[in-house]
Amino acid sequence: MKQVRTTESELKDTVVKIRRVTKVTKGGRTFGFSAVVVVGDENGVVGYGLGKSKEVIGAISKGLDTAKKNLIKVPVLKGTIPHTQLGKFGGSVVLIKPATHGTGVIAGGAMRAVLESVGITDVLAKSKGSSNPVNVVKATIDALAKLSDANAVAKRRGISLEKVYNG
């Protein structure tokens, strides 16, 4: 993954899912909360975090702290992605495809939050397999991390940019 440093003032956070979890002990049930949070600057930088606490606010703030530590840079070209990409995590499989201008973000809940945080405005996305929000977010981040633009491909192969496009 391509780690990125950015100032906290330009990051926007989105709470994807808050779950109440229960631990059953001899003395009864103990309730806690887990929160999945996505942060991004809507300009190609995104990160996610999972926070757990006895209170909702504590879980969200822990998730935010974790998300700010796990930022990656994503190539965004004219509001869409450079190519089709598949991402996997656990039982979740995510397919994201570039779309023409004006299409919008065609994606489900957890994927939509990640794609909008990156700054992608036109994309087609499909979530296959498990619909667990944590795994869907991680699979989407996996797919976005695998993306590469034409300049990166030319540099990696050691050829000119024209040769990448013309074959």
Image (cartoon, rainbow, N blue to C red):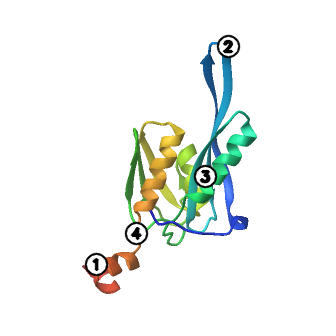
Q: Residues within 10 Å of mark 1 (few under 14, many from 20)?
A: few
Residue lying at 38% horizontally and 60% vertically, measured from the top left? 84
Please give the residue where the numbered disc 4 appears in the rendered image.
Answer: 148
Residue 121 appears in the rendering = no
Frontmost residue, 145 versus 128: 145
Left or right: 162 as drawn, with respect to 132:
left
| SS under mark 4 | loop
Q: Amino acid at mark 4?
A: Ser
The circle drawn on residue 66 is 3
Residue 124, above or below 128? below
Q: Position of residue 103 (x, y in %)?
A: 53, 59
Q: Indicate which disc, 1 or 4, sits on the residue closer to the N terminus.
A: 4
Frontmost residue, 110 versus 122: 110
Q: CA distance from mark 4 to mark 2?
A: 53 Å
Quadrant holding the N terminus: bottom left
Q: CA distance from mark 2 to mark 3?
A: 32 Å
Please state which of the two labelled residues, at mark 2 or mark 3, is closer to the viewer.
Answer: 2
